[in-house]
Image: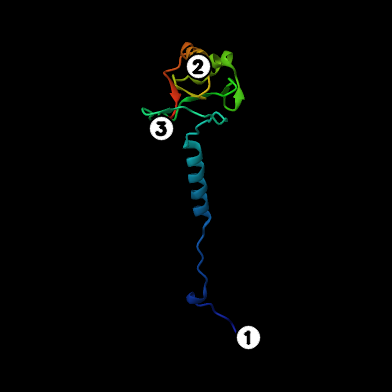
Amino acid sequence: MKKRLFQTPQATRDEINISPLIDVVFILLIFFIVTTVFVEETGVEINKPQAISAKQLEKNSILLAITETEQVIYGGRVIGVEGIASVVRRLSKKEPMPVIIQVDKKIPADLLVKVIDQSKIAGALSVSIATEAQ
């Protein structure tokens, strides 16, 4: 005689299907990556002057840097004073954005004034100078 094995309901294995969970996690990851605002840094280290009236400015702004060697830098590239207007115009096309200038302590005032003028001529919403809080 042949014996038949019958499976009882207790003998069946219950499994949790985690495929939908993985899909949801990937969708959330994509959502957070897409909605994150990326702040573009200048790419150089600047020795900023100190100010008592320093305050936080908008994150959505154009960051320019003037190094100790009097180079004007945007996004890690040297653009010079001549390239400021085109960069500010291009980035402010959709809506006017403020310009924040990170300037070294040793920079002459005339170079700083030229950078501010070029930014304003190109249509910057406002121009601020980055400082360290005292």
Q: Residues within 10 Å of mark 3 (few under 14, many from 20)?
A: few
Q: Please state which of residues 55 and 106 is positioned toward the viewer in this rendering.
A: 106
The residue tagged 3 is 133
Real-space Cα separation, disc 1 to disc 3, in angstroms? 88 Å
Q: Earlier in the sequence, mark 1 or mark 2?
A: 1
Q: Nearer the viewer, mark 1 or mark 3?
A: 3
Residue 27: x, y in percent? Answer: 50, 45
Q: Residue at x 61, y 24 (%)?
A: 77
In the image, what residue occupies the spot 48% across and 75% down?
Answer: 9
**Dot placed on the residue nearer the N-terminal end, 2 or 3:** 2
Q: Looking at the image, do the residues carrying marks 2 and 3 touch, with CB atoms under 8 Å apart?
A: no
Say what secondary structure mark 1 lies in.
loop
The C terminus, quarter of image: top left
Q: What residue is shown at x 51% (from left), y 12% (from top)?
A: 110
Tell me the amino acid under the disc marked 2.
Answer: Leu
Query: Which residue is more in the foreground, 66 or 10?
Result: 66
Amino acid beneath label 3: Ala
Q: Whole-percent x and y of residue 26? A: 52, 47
Q: Residues within 10 Å of mark 1 (few under 14, many from 20)?
A: few
| Rendered image quadrant of residue 129 | top left
Near-viewer residue (94 or 52): 52
User: Gap between marks 1 and 2, in whole Å?
Assistant: 97 Å
Looking at this view, is 129 or 1 the one in front?
A: 129
Looking at the rendered structure, the kind of residue marked 1 is Lys
The residue indicated by pointer 1 is: 2
In this rendering, is residue 11 above or below 133? below
Count the marks: how many?
3
Farthest right residue? 1
Kindly identify which residue carries mark 2.
112
- Please identify, in this view, whether the residue under mark 1 or under mark 2 is nearer the observer: 2
Q: Position of residue 2 (x, y in %)?
A: 63, 86
